[in-house]
Amino acid sequence: MAKLQKSIDKRNALVKATIDLVNNNGFHATPMSKIAKMANVSPATIYLYFENKQDLVNQTYIQVKAEYTNYTFATYEDTMPVEAGFALIWNRIADFKLKECDNALFLAQCDNTPMIDEESRQEGIKHLQPLLDLWERGRKEGIIKPVSDYVLYAYAINPLSFLMMTEKRGAFQLDKTHLEEAYESAWSSIKACK
Amino acid sequence: MAKLQKSIDKRNALVKATIDLVNNNGFHATPMSKIAKMANVSPATIYLYFENKQDLVNQTYIQVKAEYTNYTFATYEDTMPVEAGFALIWNRIADFKLKECDNALFLAQCDNTPMIDEESRQEGIKHLQPLLDLWERGRKEGIIKPVSDYVLYAYAINPLSFLMMTEKRGAFQLDKTHLEEAYESAWSSIKACK
Amino acid sequence: MAKLQKSIDKRNALVKATIDLVNNNGFHATPMSKIAKMANVSPATIYLYFENKQDLVNQTYIQVKAEYTNYTFATYEDTMPVEAGFALIWNRIADFKLKECDNALFLAQCDNTPMIDEESRQEGIKHLQPLLDLWERGRKEGIIKPVSDYVLYAYAINPLSFLMMTEKRGAFQLDKTHLEEAYESAWSSIKACK
Amino acid sequence: MAKLQKSIDKRNALVKATIDLVNNNGFHATPMSKIAKMANVSPATIYLYFENKQDLVNQTYIQVKAEYTNYTFATYEDTMPVEAGFALIWNRIADFKLKECDNALFLAQCDNTPMIDEESRQEGIKHLQPLLDLWERGRKEGIIKPVSDYVLYAYAINPLSFLMMTEKRGAFQLDKTHLEEAYESAWSSIKACK
DNA sequence: TATGAATGAGACTTCATTCAT
DNA sequence: GATGAATGAAGTCTCATTCAT
């Protein structure tokens, strides 16, 4: 049947435009009309794909978060030894934050702002489970400090967001050496002191 | 001086209202009229104290950032030994972020969002110098890892923001033990390996 | 004939949907999309049967008005005595207004609103002629007051609309006794005083 | 104190513009922008006086209805004999409907349309009590038919709306004779048969 | 014929800012 | 200095209508 389909391309263009504009101008200062223009559609078309502006932002958040965790765990297997597993995951995250800078920046803005519904926020968190499982394993094996997941995340993962944002601001250039130092710091901060 | 006729109380009320509303609703969704109402002032009055909305937010940012750094370094002296000095500063920062939660939250939102002018952002950063000097001293003495200030900040200081925000979201409760663990992680991540 | 290829069922569904929605929500608040949905048809399909929204409403009005007058005069014959003829017509009208409540309600809304073209309004009035003829006969025979048709209509027929609408609003329940009282009033108000 | 006051004149201009435009174009086809223009204010100003479009229409309805009943009962006293009282009230209503044609037309449109909130509709009905009391008295004295208020209203009062609207449409001209005939019909239809 | 997607125009409403007192 | 009223500009969203299949 030759029914027209809502084009996934249009939806993607809208999501991408949202990320770009929110990153550069903030949620305030990102009118629907600009999003439409950047995505090459009529403003009215947005409402075929999303309920309203809030929904557009929520869905964009969920989608980007999913891409983030998918990338993070794509090559990970839960049979890996703890340190190797952590190193793998950490590097994938670093990779994502540096290569998919726009996506990472968008997530940072969403995570530090009341612009996302609580429900969507929860939806976004769900897929981080493998990392938490790894840490649980590490704690049992005495390799990871016996501290809360939140503390581990704060020290092992979150600093990458800060570095990514600082680089984006042009303050400095993250090179391979910085990353090695960063990994060193991350691992130091969570590994159990023998 | 004409300036002095303006009531400092009103200005403070406006700054406080701005912080509250931006924290709870975001910069978008914080109209001048609401700020005025919460500060018990006419909308027109805001313009006696600030040029426009952007100026109000910028000045609020600068003021809060100043309070933050003032508190941080209030009892610090640059003659202290490196580790003791760091411990002192770190604890003051932790203190501030947990006790002045609203202020800290506001800074986090500003720092992860294009809602502040670049100029005001620079103005806010200036006063962190004593910490950078301490680190420089630590590196020279071989106590601190010889890595970029940005990396040190990312691992030693920034995680506190994440923990503060996570607590604010109600995900978990930061107690004294967590803070000790956090300090341990912070110091582990920046101290030079012997 | 090309016209016949169009499904009369679809047209009827559209007319019915229009009546329902306009009755319940008003002409404002009755978008074409809702009409289409209620008629189980695509919005675009409406335009195969009607020129535009105004035309849809006009045609609906004309059709309902025709059903009204057809029903009214179905069993009437212009050879009947005046009073018997009037009683017959009056009761048919009362019947219609109470049984075809939706249709009657729709007419009332159209007749008290500028939502119908003047042309369609005229078209709708045409078929009331037999009643006017009856009155003319009645006046000549000295049975009906020698007053304008408009006055007769206002007192003999129009009150039924008011009663129907009041009942629809749930204010009271029209029973057989009310109807007899109503007929009594109607006839009293137009019959010539001996 | 020199505080500016919300001007009652502006409010009145808005109410009047609403009546005019709704009468001529219908509720649909009466955008806020046109109302603002006709009242010589900015669209935004409307929202200083009314919550939203629905509220504007509701309040307009209530105000006009109040004017209607005030006028109706202005010279009435509940000590008058029944027939005299009814004649007085009936003539005041006729007066109002013919002289304040715009107001009456607006009420007719509101009363036959779902454009007014149920709550406002109830509010509007309240003030008709003196007429209902008169009828009650009339029934007790055996002067008025022992039938429901709704039926009395349908035959004694409502026809005036029909006549007013018919005249407004230009179909015919209501003169003094018509009015006398109309009163005759009204009274005939509700007075008890001796 | 029939449709779901698409859209330009325009609706309602909000808001940062100014004005008159 | 302080204010409540006022507003032009702009924002979100809807809708009658058309297009492409």
Image (spheres, coloured by chain):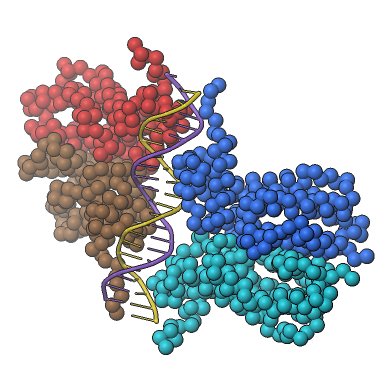
Chain colours: A blue, B cyan, C red, D brown, E purple, F yellow
Residue C75 rendering spot, x and y as whole percentages: 26, 18
Q: Who's the residue at 42% across and 26% down the image?
A: C45
Quadrant occupied by the N terminus of chain C: top left
Q: For this rendering, which residue is in front, B118 or D189?
A: B118
In this view, the residue in front, C86 or A25, is A25
How many numbered circles are shown?
Answer: 0
Task: Tell me what residue is drawn at x 57 percent, y 64 percent.
Answer: B24
The answer, for residue A188, to whether it is visible in the render is yes
- The residue that appears at 18% across and 46% down in the rendered structure is D143
Quarter-of-image position of residue D127: bottom left
Which x, y percent locates residue C36?
Answer: 43, 31
- Tell whether C101 sits left or right of B19: left
Instruction: Give left or right: position of C43 versus B151.
Output: left
Quarter of the image with the C terminus of chain C is top left
In depth, the one of D15 and D177 nearer the eye is: D15
Q: Residue E10, percent across and down?
A: 34, 44
Residue B34 is situated, as x and y percent measured from the top left of the image, at: 46, 67
Res. B138 image quadrant: bottom right
Q: In terms of depth relative to the viewer, which is nearer, D157 or A85? A: A85
Residue reaching furthest to the top: C1
Q: For residue C159, what is the image quadrant? A: top left
Q: Is residue E14 left or right of residue D77?
A: right
- Residue at 41% of width from left, 76% of height from top? B48
- Position of C50 with respect to A188 (left or right) is left
Q: Is residue D186 visible?
A: no
